Amino acid sequence: MRRFALCIFAGLLAAGAAGARADTLRLDAAKAVEMALSNPKQVELATAKMMEAVAGKGAAFGAFLPQISATGTYTCLAKVSSFPMTIPGYTNIPFWVVNPRTGETTGMTDPIPVYTPDTVSVKLGSSDNYALTGTVQQTLFTWGKLLNAYRMAGLSQEIQMQALLQARAQLRVDATSGYYQALLVRRTVGVMNDALRQLRGHVGQVQSLYDNGMATKLDLMKATLGLQQMEAQVSQVENGAELATAALLNTLGLDPATPVAFSEELAPDSFTVDVDQATQQALERRPELAQLRNAAKMAELGVRIARTANLPNAFAQANLSYKNPVGFSAEWGADWNATAGISMPIFTGLSNYSKLKAAQARHRQARIALALVEDGVKLEVKALALGLNQEAKNAAFQKKNVEVAEAALGLAQARYENGLLTNLDYMDSQVALTQARVAYLNAMANYQIAKAKLEKAIGEH
């Protein structure tokens, strides 16, 4: 039973270890970029702005279509206007017949029609008024105002699309830089631990020599002090590795506690850059320049719209009503009317003139901003290209330094064992090798980061 329980416990431990290995995220630079781009929070703002621009373009297109509206009203009049009207009428009236001589009545005549007018009050409407009205209005001619406004909305959509591409390109650079920075610190930890193991072996060797009377107490103390300093440095680098990994995971939208295994190694690259070709490519592909070019076009369209502000606009409108009363009849009935017209501002206090000047000033600003950014892009690409080439040279230089430092440490080890080298000189050789290895790692990481920045600068993202 005891053996059976131990077997079960060992199996559970093995399963737990396998599960832990399965949960570890294996990551290279390409996968880091892919995961960063799949995190919607990083580009959510730019995407929302682009959708707003798409909706704005749809709204601008709606200005070309007829505008249809419907209204329903009820109006109660406290007093209905009226006017008096005389209505003609005739009444048959018999008259008495009088003898003119005697003055006596002799009888009555037959009824005779007599004109007897009547006055009535005629109301001009009803106290209860109902109306259902549909209106159709169509703009006919605006001297290109609507067309230019629609073009501006399209350019605004293009600007936001380029802004989204710019945000994604920056996210690529952030993910790449974060990956290689985290990888650099992880590999630096490995180099420092190798140096620490070698230094511990050296301290053990010094201790043995001291115990045999072949080394001084000062040599042992210096070796021990160097070991303690190296341990402190390793601890600092390990903390830096945790922070760099957490920053990378944050960029990828993952839990900072996610275990990560870096599947890519820092290695030299043979990528070279032609500065003139890279500059030309940047001027053609950079999203920022595309945004500014579209902004300049929008400013030019704004000038065109401002120039036509004082020109007449033609429109047509039709109304169909179903109302009660209709005329003087208290019943439901249909009525319609159509209107064609021209509207034109006569005097606006020179506001349209001022708007034209403002539009022209914005156009000049857009062209100047484009020229300034183009100059800045040329300088940026040149600096990044030269920097990348320099990092490639630096990596090759540091690789040679590592080879020399390794040979020097091997020689120092042999000479120290034979008593031909002091402890301080040996430790100096150890420190020089560690510094050379770290410098080589830095050069290769800086090269990859510079390469990602240059790719963004020339618009390859």
Image (cartoon, rainbow, N blue to C red):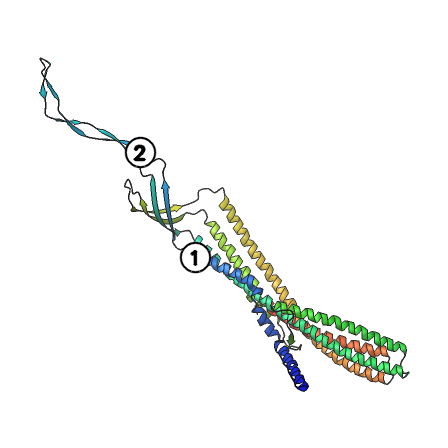
Residue 82, disc:
2
Mark nearer the viewer, 2 or 1 = 2
Q: Which sits earlier in the primary sequence, circle 2 or circle 1? A: 1
Query: Is 371 on the left or on the right of 82, as rendered?
Result: right
Give the quarter of the figure containing the N terminus. bottom right
Mark 2 crowdedness (10 Å alpha carbons): few <14, some 14-19, many ≥20: few
Q: How many marks?
A: 2
Classify mark 1: helix, strand or loop: helix
Q: Is residue 386 shown to the viewer in this render?
A: no
Q: Which residue lies most toward the top here?
A: 102
Secondary structure under tag 2 reads strand
> Which of the 4 image quadrants contains residue 170?
bottom right
Q: Is residue 384 above or below residue 422?
A: above
* Residue drawn at point x = 86 percent, y = 75 percent: 222
Instruction: Give the numbered dot on residue 61.
Output: 1
The answer to whether residue 112 is visible is yes
Question: Which residue is at the far right?
Answer: 213
Give me the residue at 66% from left, 80% from top. 13
Q: Which mark is residue 131?
A: none
Give the quarter of the figure containing the C terminus.
bottom right
Residue furthest out toward the front: 1
In the figure, 113 relative to 360: above or below?
above
Q: Is residue 349 shown above or below 118?
A: below
Residue 266, picture quadrant: bottom right
Q: Residue at x 37, y 47 (%)?
A: 72
Question: What residue lies at 19% left-to-right and 27% top-to-bottom?
Answer: 116
> With 293 as the anchor, is 183 left or right in this view?
right
Disc 1 marks a residue whose amino acid type is: Phe
Residue 424 left/right relative to 188:
right
Task: Tell me which amino acid carries mark 2.
Answer: Ser
Alpha-carbon span between mark 2 and mark 1: 50 Å
